[in-house]
Amino acid sequence: MNAAGGKIDTKATPLPPPVLVSLKSGLLVETEDKAYSFKVGGRLFVDGGGITQPLNGLSNQVGIRQARLEVVGKMAGIYFYKLSYDFAGTQSISGANQTLGGIRDAYIGIQSSLTNAPFKGAFFMIGNMFEPFSLSQQSPILYHDLIERPLPIDAFSPSRHIGAALGVYGDNWSAKTGVFSTSVEDKTLVPAPGVPALWGIPRALPWQASGGSRYFDLAGRLTYAPIKDEHTLVHVGVSGRYHQVNDATGANDDRVLNLGARIKSEAFTLNQTLLGTPDLSCGTINAPAPTNIVNASAYAAKCTKNVETFDLEMAVSHGPFSIQGEYIGSRYNRNQSAINQAFYLASVNAATAALNPTGVPLVPFGRSAYFSGYYAQATWWITGEERAQAYDVAYKNGAAFTQLNIKNPFSAGGWGAWGLSARYSSVDLNNGPYQGGQLASWIALAAFSGNRALAAYVTNVGIQGGKQQDVTVGLNWYPDLGVNFQLNWTRVMNIVAPVNGNLNQSYSTGAHPNLIEMRAKVYF
């Protein structure tokens, strides 16, 4: 009984569980049992630098590379989600930014004790995410020892796409696979909507749209660390990707069918784009001088049917020293029937519908083309930090290197983490019997003589996307968790620019630009 003579309610509503709020790294709100959480984070990258030989890049430039906000969280202990938006990705900075939209990671997933068994962890996720491919691509750029990703990763790695993926992991291994389609980061549609492929469609007749579909990818990555402890790590991995292009009237991924055209010589903000194949779909491109003596429709004869890409990766870390490398190969399988028809149409006289007496040869190089690239990188943390401690097999992208453990933060009276890195990277986007100076000589001869057949032969017998090798050295400073300053010097050791006209440049070789890039970043 209470003082007023009433009964005491012994079944009062229980108090809600306590909620923890932290500002240590972003704004985190989390229940005591960690079943529910909500975190607001973000990042800001400010880049700047200059080039000794700008070629088609910028002499110097400063800009905001990333300005991103993100929300990550959990619900009921089994559901997880992430949404990030990059405000710098929605506009152009002197042509350097090529993305169309600001959405980056945007997915939901499920992971529970039921899905974990019999593994240490298992999860399913759906939305916009990185395809499981490459160690460098899956490791967050926040924690890379050099500012930019290597040349072959920029060229071949599939980046984020919309899809569904299944991942599992153990104490020292991880596996992830999924099916993916379009990406909000696609720059262009290749071929553009309403632009017909010429093969199989008489030019004398109006072209009729036949509809189109989205391309799709099947991708997977498997990693294993036979040695993994606090001070030493040996990591190996393999990735694979099958890319099915759609029919000739639908949208395609420019990063596949315009291979290498986004590469920025490992200094993105300076916009030096030296490589890039012509359109490898069955669309058409404009023939560049001096090869414009050839009917431009001949350049439709690449006609990719599908693409098979693989990646081999390895990383070793012991104490403050670490090395890392990857090799990527990509085979482009072409539709020989489409190639034949494209060349047939190129050889027909539009006025008389008769075959050109000089004829235009079929592509003799074969029904496939192979491109490749690799890099090797070494890092020494002068202040004693150990990269093995940043290795995480439970990361949702698959095994990756995440935040370095700073031994003596600047805010606590120390010097922070200081590191030196060096990398050699190479990419070869040329394919065919005529390359380098020999190819340039044949093109010049065909232009001088006016020989259409010779010009058609030498410019279509192979695919010319160019070659490049870079050496990069860098200085890294993490004064505290969430703050990083980087300085990189990149020297282009070898460059063979493509002869195709999609970059509005001519064949060139022998240049050795030096690129200096600096980055200040804060993340929370």
Image (cartoon, rainbow, N blue to C red):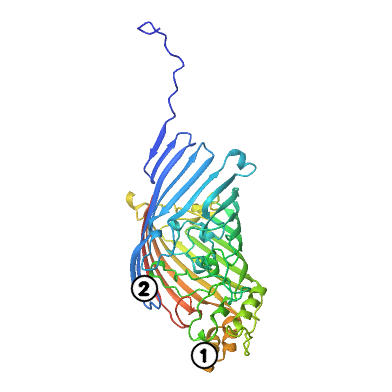
- In the image, residue 506 sits, relative to residue 152, either above or below, namely below
Q: Residue furthest top?
A: 5
Whole-percent x and y of residue 44?
36, 56
Between marks 2 and 1 in the image, the one whose residue lies nearer the viewer: 1
The numbered dot on residue 54 is: none
Q: Amino acid at mark 2?
A: Leu
Q: Secondary structure at mark 1?
A: helix
Whole-percent x and y of residue 281?
57, 70
Q: Secondary structure at mark 2?
A: loop
Residue 333 lies in quadrant:
bottom right
Residue 110 lies in quadrant:
top right
Q: Is residue 125 visible?
A: yes
Q: Amino acid at mark 1?
A: Ala
User: What residue sits right under mark 1 in the picture?
Assistant: 447
- Gap between marks 2 and 1 measured at Cα: 32 Å
User: What residue sits right under mark 2 in the picture?
Assistant: 58
Whole-percent x and y of residue 415?
35, 56
Contact check, label 2 and label 1, Cβ < 8 Å? no
Q: Is residue 404 or residue 348 the one in the foreground?
A: 348
| Quadrant including the N terminus | top left
Q: Is residue 2 or residue 352 the one in the foreground?
A: 352
Whole-percent x and y of residue 22?
38, 40
Residue 227 lies in quadrant:
bottom right
Q: Is residue 481 visible?
A: no
Q: Residue at x 36, y 68 (%)?
A: 94
Which of the two discs, 2 and 1, labels the residue nearer the N terminus?
2
